[in-house]
Amino acid sequence: MEAQETKFSFVYHEVKQRILTNQIPPGDYMPSSRILCHQFNVSRYTINRVFDALQKEGYIEIKPRIAPIVLPREAVIKQGTEGIDILRSRDNILQLYQTFALILPSLLSFAAKHCDLEILYHYKKAIKVSRMGISAGGWRPVSNLLKEILTVGGSPLLGNLYSVFELHSHLSFFTENSTFFLKVLRKDSIPITANLISILKEKDTHVMYTQLTHLLHKFVYAVQETLQHLADTLETYPLQSPAAFSWRPTRGKDYFYTRIVSDLNRRIGRGDYPRGTFLPSEKQLAAIYNVSVSTIRKALTELSQRGFVKTINGKGTMIITPDDTRVRQILPNPGRTEEALRYLHALQLLALIMHPATVNAAAKFKKKELKSLEEKLYLPDSICIIDIFEAILYHTDAQPLKSILEEAFRLTEWGHYIAYYDHKKQVLQTVNKGLRLAVHELHTGDYIEFANRIADCYYHIFQHARDIMTNKYGFSSAASIQLPEKYY
């Protein structure tokens, strides 16, 4: 497995990136150590180490009894290197904006419907700067408002996803340092920030979705033109940096054994390890995942607690079908409650974004793949949506979109039993029937209808899981998680 990131490392790099991308501009105070401790789920000792490291590198100044202040960086150095640094990440940046232009319309349309914009903390600041446009730092209050809408009206998971977009988007370069970008963006007479806020107040969410799609495509066009213009001004074009976007909402709690649990969960659901068979031995699994046997034992203990496996002395670990008692034992635990909410929010996210993601991938399916998928769809007890999802993921070219889909899907593996096995597998049968119809649409070349049916499956799974957790298992927090509208 890939090397595990330390808590210090991920906090240090994320806070530093916020400074470098001007999310926290020179002269502003850093968030307090208390706020950062809560945000990153780390100790004050770790935050203080991060502050000390940033001070040594000249990014911040620490004074007694007040939050550290961000120091100005050398303007000459910034002007001489920023354009080259941007072009090194040109492909990554463009893919990032294209990805969020694809998924943000549905996320924002859903979240804006479920919150009162005018009482949000960042609303008045966004209105004030909308009169000035997005230049001169005006993008920050508007971007903060979007993140607040996604968090309050959507979920903490959606807010976290937008935060990662901010980290990698270089918004300050485009809106503050590139007059060409602003020129392209200002071709229309209506300022983009005023237009955005007006759209977010639209009562008809389908109209909002359409208008957001148009606006974000316009924004992507301006980014694309600016990157090309920047490339034309340089004599030599820099080599492209490797893909940098990574979304890990469980960072700081993401241990090796939890990744192994997720992978084994997926393999069990996909049928690699059928019910009644045995997993490889602890020693073999340790070799497969390149970890210690004790880490494997932690993973197997977790799978056992969830009811997916049973250890038989002298024989090994056998795959079993979980039952109600396991779910009832898990949900009252405070740590499990957080996992359960994250599971539902991840299902909600997939219900919102699977349609545009599937449309993007549909044309790349081959006849041989479709035949293989059809064969699996008729196997008893098969969870074919895993195979369909992995095929869509394989045909997703944009690395940021692939990362988002992969991580959201990983978070949903926590609730395989709730989603697929309850009610004598009626849900599984309903989903597989929908998938068979979806594959048929793909055979006929109707990519939109294929995406419609895939998205419908995720809506069905989310609604079933939420209702079962609320009504059958008494998990009252699930009732407040909203079912998204369909914008397709």
Image (spheres, grey):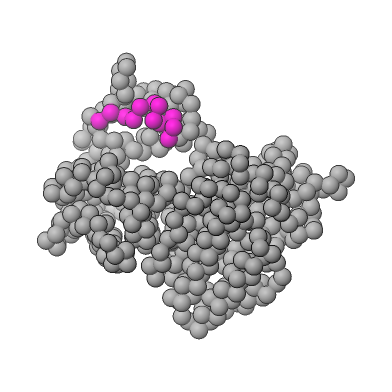
Looking at the image, can residue 413 be seen? no
Q: What x and y, as percent, mark residue 280?
A: 77, 51
Q: Residue reaching furthest top?
A: 64
Q: Residue at x 67, y 52 (%)?
A: 264
* Magenta-tinted stretch: 28-39
Residue 118 is left or right of residue 258, and the answer is left
Q: Residue at x 64, y 67 (%)?
A: 426
Q: In the figure, 15 relative to 488: above or below?
A: above
Q: Residue reaching furthest right?
A: 314
Residue 187 is left or right of residue 447, and the answer is left
- Is residue 14 on the magenta stretch? no
Looking at the image, can residue 159 be seen? yes
Of residues 209 and 202, the one drawn nearer to the viewer in this rendering: 202
Q: In the figure, 33 relative to 226: above or below?
A: above
Q: What x and y, as percent, mark residue 235?
A: 25, 53
Q: What x and y, as percent, mark residue 184?
A: 18, 59
Q: Residue at x 48, y 67 (%)?
A: 455
Q: Quadrant of the C terminus?
A: bottom left
- Is residue 34 on the magenta stretch? yes
Q: Residue at x 34, y 30 (%)?
A: 31
